[in-house]
Amino acid sequence: MRTDVQLGGLTETEEYLVTDIQAKRLQDFLKGRRDHLELSQEDVAERLDISTRTYGSWERGRVTQWADEKLYDLAEALEMSEYQVTRLFLYAVGRAPQPDLRADRTGSQDPGVTAFLDDYGSMLNALSLPTFVIDRRWDVKMANRAYHDLFCDVRAHPTAMPSRNFLRFGLFHPDAPSIFVDHLKWQLAMLAQLSSSLERNSEDNELRSIRRDVYRHPALLDAYLTDMPTWVLGSGADLVHHEGAVRELRHPDPHVGLQGCRLVEESPRSLKRLGLMRLTLVLIDHSERFTPGTCGTHRHHAA
């Protein structure tokens, strides 16, 4: 005969039932999100840097204890919104994310730092040139209106949006060649920056994930292993600091159109202390001639 033991207002049978319901909801939620992104279990496992078997057990609800950090990693791998992250926590651990942990993922809790970043964002929006702030992974942490205007016609993509990661956009988004003219030159520079970033942060999962995706594209893999090292010897490895590197881009605004472009870094010390770097796409009138190593005359255009 079955006996029901009372546990915190619920019988043992009722508690098991609630646990089973939550596990099923989590399973459906994770699979539904993965299907929406058109990812396989192997794809998600690679993003998490775990085995496919391990991720499969996560999705089947065979995890008895979820650490908050593991849930945040899962949310990033499945590109969840803040609302979806909250649902993930409710299904997995029966509560919303703790505010202090969420703050750790999105930025400093120091009110002074928060105020500085808010003011810095306001300053960026006052600039006419496309300007953005990245971290060591080239994740875009903030960008001004001119930057968003430059990419306003870009179609949705599950992993390579310019508002998320600048390297991923330039390497993988099918719309990148419509903006980055002579796309192969841009890609070589970005592959060089990926290699340089990995040298400094060899264990960073996001950078390693970008490299894995490069390896999946035969043309990019060939460029990464063969063309890029040769290019570096002649042109310099750094997408940002190679001062002679004037490339071309095409702005969607016909009044701006085809422009020369130089990436310029100008990061204040307070930004660098947060592990961030500010980049500006300096637009140069395409009708003017520039030679490597010369500065030329910059004409700033409102974007």
Image (cartoon, rainbow, N blue to C red):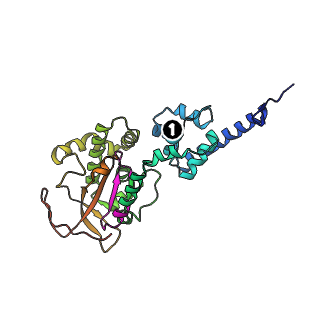
> Height in image: 60 above or below 149?
above
* Residue displayed at 43% across by 52% down: 111
At mark 1, the secondary structure is helix
Q: Amino acid at mark 1?
A: Glu
Q: Is residue 195 visible?
A: yes
Pinpoint residue 33: horizontal percent, then vertical percent: 57, 47
Pinpoint residue 127: horizontal percent, then vertical percent: 31, 66
* Residue displayed at 12% across by 56% down: 293
User: What residue span does the magenta drawing correspond to?
Assistant: 121-140
> Height in image: 75 above or below 161?
above
> Height in image: 185 above or below 18?
below
Residue 177: say if magenta: no
For the N terminus, give its image quadrant. Answer: top right
Taking depth in this image into account, of 271 and 259 the one nearest to the observer is 271
Report the number of numbered marks: 1
Pinpoint residue 301: horizontal percent, then vertical percent: 27, 70
Quadrant for residue 151, please give it.
Answer: bottom left
Q: Residues within 10 Å of mark 1 (few under 14, many from 20)?
A: few
Write down the residue under mark 1: 69
Taking depth in this image into account, of 261 and 186 the one nearest to the observer is 261
Left or right: residue 183 compared with residue 175: left
Pinpoint residue 141: horizontal percent, then vertical percent: 39, 53
> Quick one: which residue is furthest to the top in this view?
1
Q: Is residue 32 visible?
A: no
Taking depth in this image into account, of 143 and 35 the one nearest to the observer is 143
> Quick one: which residue is furthest to the bottom in this view?
255
